[in-house]
Amino acid sequence: MFGAVAKTYYAAMLGKRPEQIVVVSVMPCTAKKFECQRPEMDASGSRDVDIVLTTRELGKMIHAAGIDFDALPDEEMDAPLGLSSGAADIFANTGGVMEAAIRTAYEVVTGRELPLAGLHVAEVAGLEGVKEASLKFESVKPEWKFLEGVTLEVAVAHGLGNAHRVISAVKSGEKHYHFIEVMACPGGCIGGGGQPRYTNNEVRRARIEAIYREDEGKKLRKSHENPAILQLYGDFLTDGPLGHRSHELLHTTYAPREKA
Ligand code: SF4
């Protein structure tokens, strides 16, 4: 998604064509090295992400170059899209994407601000394999009237065995959810195959605690309040969230692949 935005929105700012930009993504994930080569990953009209480095590889490169981060002066992130919210930080752990989405969905649909205590959705957090939560929309903005009184049912699974359990329950009709978050790695991306070795539950919990500390330390904790995101929609994805342009650039449909 970021690659497609970089090669369209950012490219237009620089007066460049998509193929004149090289996007390097630093990821927790070895699977992304393959994914960026998939034919579906060309929403920009060019390959959206050219190179994927894992966090472990980046760490090795930093060590090899002798860079001491503690000794470097702090700097602002580059614009555009350098500003991130706490909601982005928590994406890295199981339940984090769901929690970030709930923070935004609640405020967009009801028009009311979530109290600080409501920002952390404890039901979808933690290392339990499958987590569920319900969210009832008691009163909503007029344009969301069809959601009034609806109870949103969500599920979160991490690890493919747990994902299989959830999918089987949905297919059999035993469960019905409005939104399911699946992360393939145990614990989510904080336990990804490209992360520093070696990962066990103690390490996963420490990483989860670290990203929640990061989230809690930020003033900006909801995606829909991020000025950089608002500017992106204002200047470029002008038909808004769920509009045609954002759908084309930010969403993907995967075609089945032949089994090796
Ligand atoms: S959960 Fe694992 S496979 Fe999925 S994006 Fe994160 S690191 Fe990659």
Image (cartoon, rainbow, N blue to C red):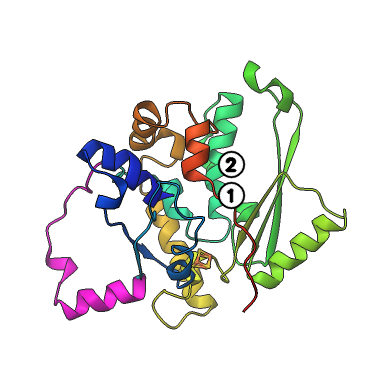
Q: CA distance from mark 1 to mark 2?
A: 6 Å
Extent of the magenta region:
55-79
Which quadrant would residue 172 be assigned to in this image?
Answer: bottom right
Residue 177, x across and y down, in percent = 75, 47
216 is higher (above) or lower (below) than 241: below
Residue furthest to the top: 142
> Would you say residue 30 is visible in this rendering?
yes
Which quadrant would residue 236 be assigned to in this image?
Answer: top left
36 is higher (above) or lower (below) than 64: above
The image's mark for residue 102 is: 2
Give 188 or 218, whichever is nearer the viewer: 188
Cβ of mark 1 under 8 A from ligand 1: no
- Near mark 1 (Cα within 10 A), the count class, few <14, some 14-19 or many ≥20, is many
Residue 102, x across and y down, in percent = 58, 41
What is the total number of numbered labels drawn onto the structure image? 2
188 is higher (above) or lower (below) than 147: below
223 is higher (above) or lower (below) than 253: above
Three-letter residue code for mark 1: Met
Instruction: Determine if the magenta segment contains residue 150.
Output: no
The image's mark for residue 98 is: 1
Task: Write the residue at 56% across / 23% down.
Answer: 111
Q: Are marks 1 and 2 in contact (CB under 8 Å)?
A: yes
Instruction: Determine if the magenta segment contains residue 58.
Output: yes
Residue 241, x across and y down, in percent = 51, 32
Give the side of residue 30 with respect to residue 9, left or right.
Answer: right
Residue furthest to the right: 173
